[in-house]
Amino acid sequence: MNLSPVVIAIPMYFILMAIEMIALRFQKHPGYRLNDAITNINCGVLSQVTGVFIKVLSIGIYTLIFEKAALFQIPNTIWTFLLLFFLYDFCYYWAHRMSHEINLFWGGHVVHHSSEEYNLSVALRQSSTQTLWTFFFYFPLAFLGFDPVMLVLASGINLLYQFWIHTEAIGKMGFLEHFLNTPSHHRVHHGRNPKYIDKNHGGTFILFDKWFGTFQKEEETPTYGITTPVNSWNPVWVNLAHYATMKQELKQIKNWSDKVKYLVKKPGWLPEYLGGYRSPKEIESNYQKFDTVVPSTMNWYVLVQYTLLLVLTGYFLFEVNNFTWLPKVLISAIIIWTTVSFSGIFEKRSWYFPQEVLRILAFAGIVFFIGQTLLPLPILYPALGTFAAFSITWLWKNQQLNSKIPSASL
């Protein structure tokens, strides 16, 4: 069983999101849009699923350094863990800050900032590639001799702490604002207003921002998102969009030295002969959030199918250590396919209906593959048959209605 604090806390995430929705309703705040919230959670699902493979690299190298090159043997006590937690947040600050200040690294982190809303579901909007650009920032902790198991625990708790600060339901928090990262401080971090960009990088503590000159208090209400909106509900494209832009801009850059500079300088940098640095601009007066409209029955269809996806994903993440490589790959593939399929429904892509029918059948096949050891076949066969028939019928009956409703911002 996977005992990562982040995985164990999955049920609590959804309980807290439900509480936030109720609180925002009392505050008469719109708070959530289904298409945005599902895209946020989809990005988190992709991050956790791909992390099954990527974390083998990052934790593996950390463990190798710890075993072969550690300068000290630090015992695992409550006091050394508290020290590790503080030092981990220090490393996190610099990894996070560099993810904003180095264009290549921003390709991994931009996913988290690309939602135009700010609620607890945004905390789950995590990148599938960020680990590639940040895992080495924690290697000093391995050289010092901090146990890899304790590092994973500190990392999980740090990430869990950052979940609750993604909300507009909580205002400023008095004296805690002086040393902890709070919802107010983190709202600033997610703002695309020029005064808020690249501020408040701390994870648990805000101290490092105050010490190193990147602190900004919340003043006017932030406008959330990124300066060039991604305008898509497709979590795979959300992960790849910045890299695609980089590829196009690299083609325009003439020499290799400028190409390297483009990778390591701030996002927005170009050589002078291509116009130079593009600084963030003030929010446009006619700015509107990206949105699309589908029939309410299709929203319910996605919500039901999504609940089933989350059950499969939760089971996969809890039991991942008991799977061999083939089922890991197959289950990961159907999870990723499902998240992309939902984006096709929200965006009313021409391909959404035929591939969704195939996805339903493939989903049932995967569940049958892993469910044979969990349920007797006389129960499994009719359950999956009913699921497939009901899903395809529901989808087919709503296809024409979906095509008649115009989308808002495609």
Image: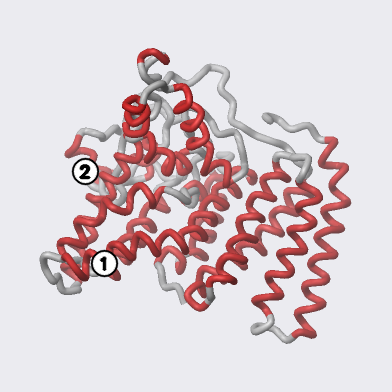
Instruction: Looking at this view, name the residue that lies furthest to the left.
Output: 72
- Name the quadrant containing residue 289: top right
Q: How crowded is mark 1: few (under 14 residues within 10 Å), some or many (20 or more)?
A: few
Mark 2 or mark 1: whose residue is earlier in sequence: 1
* Residue depicted at 45% across the width and 28% down the height: 250
Q: Is 320 situated left or right of 404 in this image?
A: left
Tell me, for residue 138, which label it has, or none. none
Q: In which quadrant is the C terminus drawn?
A: top right
* Residue 25 visible to an observer of this rendering: no
Instruction: Looking at this view, name the residue that lies furthest to the front.
Output: 255
Kind of residue at badge 2? Phe
* Residue depicted at 57% across the width and 65% down the height: 329
- Name the quadrant containing residue 286: top right
Q: Is 50 situated left or right of 390 in this image?
A: left
Relative depth, front residue between 219 and 36: 36
**Picture coordinates of residue 81, whole percent (x, y):** 21, 66
Residue of label 2: 208
**Picture coordinates of residue 158, whole percent (x, y):** 33, 57
Rendered position, 409 above or below 27: above
Residue of label 1: 64
* Residue depicted at 50% across the width and 58% down the height: 50
Element carrying mark 2: helix
Rendered position, 108 above or below 72: above
Q: How far is the residue under mark 2 from the one under mark 1?
A: 29 Å
- Name the quadrant containing residue 209: top left
Relative depth, front residue between 133 and 287: 133
